[in-house]
Image: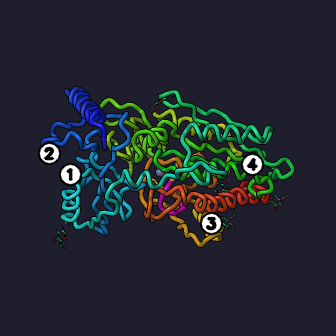
Amino acid sequence: MIPVGFILHLLLLASSFIAVIKGASVGKENELDLQSIYERYGRNPEDTWLSVLDESYSQGRYARWQQLSTNCGSTGVDVEQLLSDWFDDGMAVLMSEDGTTDPVEVAVAPPLVNEAQEKLRESNCTASVVAEDLEKLFFSTLSPVRVANPITETFLELQEIEKFIHDLVAKYPGQAQIKQIGETENGTAIHMVIIKPKPSRTVPLNGTVTPPVVFVDSGTHAREWLSVSTSLYAIQQLLEQPSSPARQVEWRIVPVVNPDGYAYSWNTNRLWRKNRKSGSGRCQGVDLNRNFDINFAGVGASSRPCSYQYCGPSAFSEPETRAVRDAILEVGSRLKGYMALHSYSQVILLPWAYKPDEHPNLSNMTAMGEGMVKEISKARGTVFGVYDTYKNFYPGSGISMDWASSIGIPYTMTLELHDKGEHGFLYPASKINDAVTEVWKGIEYFGQEIARQSREGYFLRK
Ligand SMILES: *[C@@H]1O[C@H](CO)[C@@H](O)[C@H](O)[C@H]1NC(C)=O
Ligand SMILES: *[C@@H]1O[C@H](CO)[C@@H](O)[C@H](O)[C@H]1NC(C)=O
Ligand SMILES: *[C@@H]1O[C@H](CO)[C@@H](O)[C@H](O)[C@H]1NC(C)=O
Ligand SMILES: *[C@@H]1O[C@H](CO)[C@@H](O)[C@H](O)[C@H]1NC(C)=O
Ligand SMILES: *[C@@H]1O[C@H](CO)[C@@H](O)[C@H](O)[C@H]1NC(C)=O
Ligand SMILES: [Zn+2]
């Protein structure tokens, strides 16, 4: 039995939410108009999905929200555009890494599901319900126990990540160090792990500065937890397996580029993507992977603050992207490889994303990508694709990979990790081990190739 006091408590909570919402909805432009949503869809104070405005109310936020898998084929329909009112109202959330590659997954609040399906079908898109209650799905993907190697069996919260990297690095003095490369608007530190090559293995760089460096970042999009697990596993392998051929180069790895967003995806909104930059209106956050200084605010980016692809007011307006920029520039000409880890789709994306022109080094980068794909597939046959991003995947502007290439880093890529949409961002903890161990083989190959090509003088040629 549920005690009466508890119900009373809930009612009190509910009424205080309504008071907060009412108070907040007066006057400001771009504000969620809950009153009109109540009027449009009918109001039930116990419907927790109405608590979208209340930041402290995490559990129940997505109770009974449904996940629709939509496919618009060749209709050219942009699902975000089609459902834009609801996206802006916070009543629908895009659950795909990009909104143009079929199928596009969307999360929709309970009263809108039928209408959303109808709207999509009218535009000749198909739409089917693939999850009936997202909140339940979130919890089913988490691992209940903390185990021997936590990073391959559970997702870690921000504080756990910090502890993990500090403890690990402390075990390898002289080989690894942690450097703060910036802090968020909220004052949260952004950390980079530097792992030196094994001295005996350092590549004689054939006339250029030594040693070569590979830069990796992850956790740029908050909800892409698997990208963080993958970085942490790479750090662990590099230090615990010093005979790895990847230890011939120096690694600089930023496991969580967007710590405020990452924490928010744990404590408030599992599907949060952007940073937590405060906005003037209702909508917060900037898509950090649209904020780099390359074709800023162009194709595949949005200037609407409510959009999941909002590029921000100007290039490098965000402390997180400035931190990554400065950490990259600081390395100088030793930097030979840049890899951005994201999820999901199981593809290796190559520049350019912002224009259809063929990159002058596309054939070399494709060869690198295919070598990685081969290594990744060895464990259990998992197939990653290799794509020229603009032409074969999706156009995007202000993307870190393109910016990194534009400043002359020879090999730059974006890895969209597991899976192909079966679980998407809600990748189950029980499968982290399979994913990170096989992708590590691809990352290791990347480092080994950079070392080989440095040694053979490839980077000296014009
Ligand atoms: C959907 O398809 C039908 C039949 O092919 C066509 O008549 C209609 O114009 C299409 N609707 C949209 C919005 O594209
Ligand atoms: C800012 O950081 C504090 C803890 O350091 C955290 O409790 C709070 O939620 C953070 N706020 C944002 C907007 O990330
Ligand atoms: C880079 O591409 C050029 C031209 O296709 C080729 O000759 C060269 O061998 C490639 N280098 C590497 C290291 O793949
Ligand atoms: C250095 O690179 C050149 C090609 O630029 C190559 O011929 C030479 O063998 C390399 N030296 C070493 C020590 O690998
Ligand atoms: C292509 O690769 C070569 C060899 O590393 C490098 O010197 C050159 O800068 C690269 N070009 C571009 C456009 O990245
Ligand atoms: Zn991403």
Magenta segment boundaries in residue numbering:
343-352
Looking at the image, tell me whether mark 2 or mark 3 is earlier in sequence order: 2
> Label 3 CB, ligand 6: below 8 Å?
no
Looking at the image, tell me whether mark 2 or mark 1 is earlier in sequence order: 2
> Label 2: which residue?
42
> Label 3: which residue?
376
- Which image quarter holds the N terminus? top left
> Label 1: which residue?
111
Residue 349 among those drawn in magenta: yes
Looking at the image, tell me whether mark 3 or mark 1 is earlier in sequence order: 1
**How many residues crowd around disc 3 within 10 Å: few (fewer than 14), some, or many (20 or more)?**
many
Q: Position of residue 228 (x, y in %)?
A: 56, 48
Q: CA distance from mark 2 to mark 1?
A: 9 Å
- The structure residue drawn at horizontal position 20% and vertical position 29%, both measured from the top left corner, is 22
Horizontal side of residue 93 vs 460, given as left or right: left
User: Which SS class for mark 3?
Assistant: helix
- The structure residue drawn at horizontal position 38% and vertical position 31%, both measured from the top left corner, is 278
Residue 80 has which mark? none
> Label 4: which residue?
239
Residue type at mark 3: give it: Ile
